[in-house]
Image (spheres, helix red, strand yellow):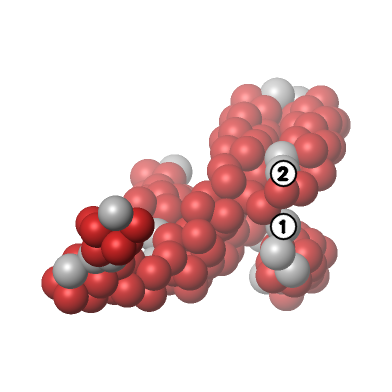
Amino acid sequence: MAGSERSRAEPSPAEAAGLLAEVGRLPARTRRLAATKFTRVSLVAWGVAWVFGYAAVQLLPQPVGLGAFAVLGVGAVTLTRLGAPGELLSGWEAQFRRGWWVLIGVMPLLGLIVQPTPLPTLLLLLGALWGVALLLFAVTVSDRALGAVGLTIVAGAAAIHVLAGG
């Protein structure tokens, strides 16, 4: 009886091939899930901070608008720090996080390169750079939806600049 139970538990060659194919796809699926979980809150937080911060700089007096932009940035940093669930951290996330901090850190230097530039134009440029980074990350993790978001950010920043007469 034990032999007949064992034979029922063993997959056929076709089933075994299917299971092996699924196992082969598991690392990519796991990495994509981890990337999605790791970045979802951060990317939404930074996107919201940029959109509302840009609007604040455009619509409010400059010191107030810049203050609002800074407060939104601090909120995005806070959500970024809280948004990475520990159970999904496998090692590459720390390197990815350092890459984002490097990008955020060099953005003001890029602003110096294009001086004199009106502040709203500078913010559009930096937002577009963020969109490019998002697009590159999407290519890395094979996430077409995230890539579409990055491309939309870059195209939107360009369209806003053109429509504003820049």
Q: Is 23 placed left or right of 127 in the picture?
A: left
Q: As drawn, is 28 to the left or to the right of 41?
A: left
Q: Percent position (x, y) of residue 140?
A: 48, 72
From this viewpoint, is residue 49 visible? yes
Q: Quadrant of the N terminus?
A: bottom left
Q: Residue at x 79, y 38 (%)?
A: 82
Residue nearest the observer in this picture, 88 or 137: 88
Residue wearing tag 2: 85
Q: Position of residue 119 (x, y in %)?
A: 69, 49
Query: Which quadrant holds residue 41?
Result: top right
120 to the left or right of 163: right
Q: Residue at x 60, y 34 (%)?
A: 48
- Residue at the far front in the pictured view: 1
Tell me, for residue 48, which label it has, or none: none
Q: Mark 2: which amino acid?
A: Pro
Image height of 127 relative to 31, above or below: above
Q: Secondary structure at mark 1?
A: loop
Q: Position of residue 132 (x, y in %)?
A: 51, 65
Query: Seen in the image, is 100 located left or right of residue 153?
Result: right
Disc 1 from disc 2: Cα separation = 7 Å
Residue 17: image x %, image y %?
23, 75
Q: Which residue is mark 1?
A: 89
The relative height of residue 107 versus residue 127 in the rendered view (above or below) is below
| Callout 1–callout 2 Cβ contact below 8 Å | yes
Front-most of 40 and 74? Answer: 40
- Mark 1 surroundings within 10 Å by alpha-carbon count, few (fewer than 14), some (14 through 19), many (20 or more): some
